[in-house]
């Protein structure tokens, strides 16, 4: 986008035009008559043209100062769609005669003085042979670089010496920085009553020097919003349109405009009245007017709000009339209790004791329309369709929709996959532990006389991994059924809240179903997990782990009860799916996945205070409390309530209690453990084994210390009746919790609330492995596995003073009393709303950007570029290819002609760019055909070392290779040649000295980082952490770069951290050097015949220099050829069959083409749509392969068929 002033003080923004399809000069091409429709390389319907300019950076090698390459303008258009120039009436006498469209070329000027000292002031003696500075002063006057303009910019980074003036190191043109004189306002701004320079002053008041960006303003933002110039290019003739003046002042000054011989307008440095600034001034004037209108509208809105706050109830009435939010609470088990009257056969239902249940005075229910979707478990079997219809009708009155499944699907989903795989994995039980009989599922093993009623008889055997496949299929069927049913009910803006692991695929499947039926995502989705989330190592053991994670990540908000669970989820997402997280505004955590930001939230919930208060007043509760106190009179009561399963830690609790009685005989007559064990029947073999173990320990304790020290009972069901539970809490002196792995257990919170009126509040002893320990600040922490620590903690709790008990109780009672399920739901919905607001802001911002009047300069130029960045049409390439005879094709290797596998950030499993990867066979055959054409020069430019590149594609005749980012290369291997000759570019780095410093440092990091190793190439040193732990490897790489920068500061090298490797390379090295050298060599052949076709393709940031080198090469073929900086010297690395032409060794002194009027086709193509210097893009490496196949066959109908992975793997066994 930027050009610089030329040495004689004049500035011209355009150089040689490089034809892209659509130019009228297509007629001059040799060969067949070209169809302009065929030549148009556009599939993207948003735009009919694209433009790009050469990236120009001045360095000490490109003296004289203020001189850089002229930019190259590339135009791609369909003349049949072209319109008349914008802003010109059809009757305008100045309108160009051509009916073709006009392309707006935007550009800026930059002056760079690198600061090298010479005999004159920064090399200015070249412009002032007699040394009297008169010529230099004249030049500065012409370019409008004066001390006044520099002072206004506030520049303080200068270059100077005793013999000459000082100059800024870098200076961007900005004539509107501080123009305060009314007479300097342009007429258009004055018409809108807006001083356009004032707006620029407020934005750039600190400085416009690259090195002097003050005031905390983002330099990229400042530079991006600098004023721009515009030239109109007639697309049909590729000539400059002389823009007519738009004001009387400009009409008077029209005769004073200066043009070059080829009709290009000469700009004046900081010439705010230059006609090329006209579009900028027009747009800024419109923008200022639009901003003024927005301010007026905001003031009117503020007045309306103020009026409403002073007593006007109209706004409140309108707010009340808004439709209430609809929320679908989707859970596998509906929070209802369903029973069937055995006498009448009538079904009855009521809400269960659940935080998902509907409560009468819930603020959540009163603020939205909630509807529940799920399945039911009944005490009587559902025998026929009549029962199903009756249940549907009954539950519909409770705002519930019930789903029914075949018994085999239900059991395989819930008792199989959910309970045998997911529940265990989420509770940190790995596959090896699952094979233990204690974790198996035997329906015949029951701890009591009650019989099982399940149907999975195959589960009586020990664990079999082969069962997981059918179970997972049932799991997907259930989730898909839920998705279909919910999709039928939802409307736009509805919220779908999915609960727990049983439906972890539902967010993704529901989104797919919405797109299938409605073509868009209709709803906002929340997924909340109520059990622990495992560490990534456990989660990776599950074959279906990635699918589970992807399903969850299709929600808009993912919720957990604690940070530990969220941390494990984020780690698994990173290591399995390559998804990283970031901090968001307001303390939220955001995960970037598929161009969306998913919010990860932690929100805890407590009990329902009003419900607990009501139950505590019941006679049954009061009587049960009194009975317990009477039964254990004279003893302090230790309460325990657990599910009889292995992970509840009841066995560890009894061991600790037994040891306490053994070590402290004084407690034997003063304490009692009241332990209740629940038997829900969900994991029957686990429960049977656990109950057997518990009974043995209880019997042993009673035998040793008597029946009075322990009160043990077993209760069938998943919970103790609430009145009995509260009686236990109120009667006890402490609650003893020894859970090993569990989700959120509300009983300790309920215990704290039940003690609120106690004269001596009870104490909670909580396992550090329980989620509730992270919620209760007043609880005492224990590790159930540390027996001595547990004994000391129990003793502390029982002997704690009243003051400390009250203090610990006060720490928690406020949260416990104020965090009901309704408040918890509101908190999660608030996070969803914040996420939605951010999305809405993004949408509004995008919509705002659609209006040019509201865009700043950077937004305007970025949107224009994005709209004009078009997908490559292979037909345009083939047409240009057939019409040319001196062609150069430069291709990147990995990711361009080698197809990448799916991304996996766990680098040990990541196949991207691994050594030895080769292009598909069809690509190799196409390259061989293209290389066989003597009119083609084909090079593959790779960042890998020469050994790997040569091994992969070195046997293709006629193919040139460049390795190590172009530092070494091998000319095309001719037919009959057997050995390649390798050459290297001398980039002026003492590589032996660099190795002596860098290798010991890299070796130190290699010894400390498992999986890392050092890679040696011709002109680079690499430290690969590709096979390391991704987080630790990335962390070590950052530290390594810091140390390398410090130790190698004296060497002309730079550091690249990309794709799992830290590389030390020469500062001047990039792929563009070798590409430009190849182009120069081909252009210099046959008496500087030039190049008429260039195709350059690459996929990552290292390929960007290839694209810009193509533009730079084109510009130097015109009048700038005397200032061409030669390529680095070449040395021979290996002996082999030398090419017939040695032009690669000795570069031609001049590359000016003999025929500058001949058309040239230049295609720079990025693999993937992204910010790039390329002029067009393809979607992936498959498109590159497809294009090469089409070029090799000369037919647009040919296509690339990718080899199936199974077939490719099969070849390894044949």
Image (tube, rainbow, N blue to C red):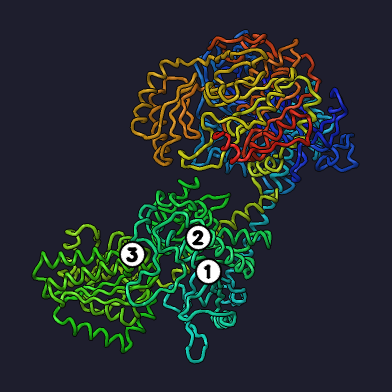
Residue at left offset 16%, top offset 82%: 633
Residue at left offset 68%, top offset 59%: 519
Where the N terminus falls, by quadrant?
top right
Mark 1, residue position: 330
Q: Is mark 2 on a helix, strand or loop?
A: helix
Q: Earlier in the sequence, mark 3 or mark 1?
A: 1
Q: How far apart are marks 1 and 2 (CA)?
A: 21 Å
Q: Is residue 243 left or right of residue 405?
A: right
Mark 2, residue position: 471
Where the C terminus falls, by quadrant?
top right
Mark 3, residue position: 772
Q: Where is residue 857, by image quadrant? A: top right
Q: Which of marks 1 and 2 is nearer the N terminus?
A: 1
Q: How far apart are marks 3 and 1 (CA)?
A: 25 Å
Can residue 778 be seen here? The reply is no
Residue at left offset 29%, top offset 76%: 714
Nearest to viewer (mark 3 / mark 1) = 1
Q: Position of residue 74 (x, y in %)?
A: 74, 31
Q: Position of residue 160 (x, y in %)?
A: 51, 20
Total labels: the figure holds 3
600 or 726, which lies in front? 726
Q: In this view, does 884 lie above or below 829?
A: above
């Amino acid at each position: 986008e930027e050009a610089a002033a030329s040495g004689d003080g004049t500035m011209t923004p355009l150089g040689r035009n490089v034809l892209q399809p659509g130019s009228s000069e297509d007629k001059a091409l040799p060969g067949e008559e070209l169809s302009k429709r065929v030549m148009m390389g556009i599939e993207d319907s948003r735009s009919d043209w694209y433009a790009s300019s050469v990236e120009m950076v001045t360095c000490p090698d490109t003296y004289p100062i203020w001189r850089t390459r002229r930019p190259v303008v590339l135009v791609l258009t369909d003349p049949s769609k072209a319109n008349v120039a914008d802003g010109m009436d059809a009757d305008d006498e100045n309108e160009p005669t051509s009916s073709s469209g006009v392309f707006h070329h935007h550009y800026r000027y930059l002056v760079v003085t690198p600061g090298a000292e010479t005999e004159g002031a920064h090399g200015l003696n070249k412009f002032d042979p007699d040394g009297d500075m008169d010529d230099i002063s004249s030049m500065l006057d012409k370019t409008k670089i004066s001390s006044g303009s520099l002072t206004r910019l506030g520049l303080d980074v200068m270059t100077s010496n005793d013999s000459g003036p000082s100059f800024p190191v870098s200076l961007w043109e900005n004539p509107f920085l501080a123009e305060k004189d009314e007479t300097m306002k342009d007429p258009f701004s004055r018409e809108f009553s807006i001083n356009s320079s004032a707006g620029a002053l407020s934005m750039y008041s600190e400085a416009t020097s690259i090195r002097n960006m003050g005031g905390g303003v983002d330099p990229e933002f400042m530079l991006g919003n600098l004023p721009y110039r515009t030239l109109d290019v007639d697309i049909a003739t590729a000539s400059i349109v002389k823009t007519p003046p738009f004001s009387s002042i400009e009409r008077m000054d029209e005769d004073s405009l200066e043009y070059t011989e080829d009709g290009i307008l000469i700009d004046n440095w900081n010439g705010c009245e230059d006609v090329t600034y006209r579009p900028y001034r027009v747009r800024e004037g419109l923008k200022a007017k639009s901003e003024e209108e927005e301010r007026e509208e905001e003031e009117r809105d503020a007045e309306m709000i103020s009026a409403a706050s002073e007593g006007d109830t109209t706004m409140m009435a309108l707010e009340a009339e808004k439709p209430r939010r609809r929320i679908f609470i989707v859970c596998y088990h509906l929070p209802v209790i369903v029973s069937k009257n055995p006498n009448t056969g009538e079904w009855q239902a009521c809400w269960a004791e659940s935080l998902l249940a509907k409560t009468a005075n819930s603020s959540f229910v009163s603020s939205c329309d909630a509807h529940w979707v799920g399945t039911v478990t009944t005490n009587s079997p559902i025998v026929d369709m009549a029962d199903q219809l009756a249940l549907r009708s009954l539950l519909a009155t409770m705002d519930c929709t019930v789903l029914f499944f075949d018994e085999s699907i239900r059991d395989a989903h819930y008792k199989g996959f959910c309970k045998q795989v997911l529940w265990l994995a989420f509770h940190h039980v790995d596959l090896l532990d699952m094979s233990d009989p204690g974790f198996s599922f035997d329906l015949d093993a029951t701890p009591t006389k009650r019989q099982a009623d399940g149907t999975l008889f195959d589960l009586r055997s020990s664990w079999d991994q082969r069962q997981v496949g059918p179970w997972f299929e049932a799991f997907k069927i259930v989730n898909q059924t839920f998705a279909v049913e919910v999709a039928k009910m939802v409307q736009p803006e509805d919220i779908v809240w999915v609960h727990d692991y049983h439906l972890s695929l539902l967010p993704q499947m529901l989104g797919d179903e919405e797109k299938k039926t409605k073509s868009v995502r209709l709803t906002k989705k929340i997924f909340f997990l109520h059990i622990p989330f495992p560490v990534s190592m456990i989660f990776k053991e599950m074959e279906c782990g990635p699918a589970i994670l992807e399903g969850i990540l299709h929600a808009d908000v993912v919720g957990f009860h604690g940070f530990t669970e969220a941390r494990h989820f984020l780690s698994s997402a990173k290591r399995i799916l390559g998804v990283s997280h970031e901090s968001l505004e307001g303390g939220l955590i955001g995960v970037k996945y598929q161009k969306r930001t998913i919010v990860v939230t932690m929100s805890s919930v407590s009990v329902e205070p009003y419900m607990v208060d009501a139950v505590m007043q019941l006679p049954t509760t009061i009587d049960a409390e009194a009975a317990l106190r009477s039964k254990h009179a004279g003893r302090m009561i230790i309460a325990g309530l657990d599910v009889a399963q292995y992970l509840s830690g009841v066995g560890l609790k009894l061991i600790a209690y037994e040891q306490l009685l053994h070590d402290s005989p004084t407690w034997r007559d003063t304490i009692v453990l009241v332990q209740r064990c629940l038997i829900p029947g969900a994991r029957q073999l686990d429960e049977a084994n656990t109950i057997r173990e518990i009974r043995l320990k209880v019997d042993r304790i009673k035998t040793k210390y008597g029946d009075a020290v322990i009160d043990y009972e077993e209760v069938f069901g998943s919970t103790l009746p609430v009145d009995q539970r509260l009686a236990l809490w109120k009667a006890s002196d402490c609650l003893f919790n020894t859970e090993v792995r569990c989700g959120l257990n509300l009983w300790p919170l309920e215990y704290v609330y039940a003690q609120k009126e106690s004269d001596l509040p009870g104490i909670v002893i909580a396992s550090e492995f329980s989620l509730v320990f992270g919620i209760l600040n007043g609880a005492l922490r224990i590790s159930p596995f540390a027996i001595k620590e547990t004994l000391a903690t129990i003793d502390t709790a029982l002997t704690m003073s009243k003051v400390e008990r009250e203090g610990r109780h006060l720490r928690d009672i406020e949260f416990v009393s104020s965090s009901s399920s309704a408040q918890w739901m509101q908190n999660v919905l608030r996070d969803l709303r914040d996420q939605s607001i951010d999305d809405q802001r993004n949408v509004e911002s995008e919509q705002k950007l659609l209006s040019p009047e509201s865009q700043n300069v950077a937004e305007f130029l970025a949107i224009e570029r994005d709209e004009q960045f078009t997908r490559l049409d292979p037909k345009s390439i083939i047409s240009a290819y057939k019409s040319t005879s001196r062609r150069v094709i430069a291709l990147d290797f990995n990711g361009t002609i080698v197809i990448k596998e799916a991304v996996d950030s766990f680098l040990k499993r990541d196949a991207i760019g691994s050594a030895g990867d080769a292009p598909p066979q069809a690509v190799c055959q196409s390259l061989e055909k293209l290389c066989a054409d003597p009119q083609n020069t084909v090079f593959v430019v790779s960042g890998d070392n020469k050994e790997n590149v040569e091994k992969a594609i070195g046997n293709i005749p006629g193919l040139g290779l460049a390795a190590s980012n172009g530092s070494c290369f091998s000319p095309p291997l001719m037919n009959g040649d057997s050995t390649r000759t390798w050459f290297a570019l001398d980039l002026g780095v003492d590589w032996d000295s660099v190795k002596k410093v860098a290798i010991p440092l890299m070796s130190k990091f290699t010894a400390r980082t498992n999986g890392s190793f050092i890679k040696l190439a011709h002109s680079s040193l690499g430290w690969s952490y590709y096979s390391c732990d991704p987080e630790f490897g990335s962390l070590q790489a950052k530290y390594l770069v810091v140390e390398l920068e410090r130790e190698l500061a004296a060497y002309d090298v730079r550091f690249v951290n990309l794709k799992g490797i830290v590389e030390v390379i020469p500062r001047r090295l990039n792929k563009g050097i070798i590409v430009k050298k190849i182009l120069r060599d081909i252009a210099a052949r046959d008496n500087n015949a030039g190049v008429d076709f260039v195709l350059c393709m690459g996929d990552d940031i290292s390929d960007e220099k290839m694209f810009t080198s193509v533009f730079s090469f084109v510009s130097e073929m015109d009048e700038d050829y005397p200032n061409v900086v030669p390529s680095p010297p070449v040395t021979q690395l290996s002996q082999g069959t030398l090419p017939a032409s040695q032009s690669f060794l000795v570069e031609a002194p001049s590359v000016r083409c003999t025929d500058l009027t001949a058309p040239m086709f230049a295609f720079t193509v990025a693999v993937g749509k992204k910010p790039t210097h390329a002029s067009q893009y393809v979607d992936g490496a498959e498109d590159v392969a497809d294009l090469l196949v089409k070029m090799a066959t000369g037919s647009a109908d040919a296509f690339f068929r990718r080899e199936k992975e199974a077939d490719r793997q099969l070849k390894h066994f044949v």
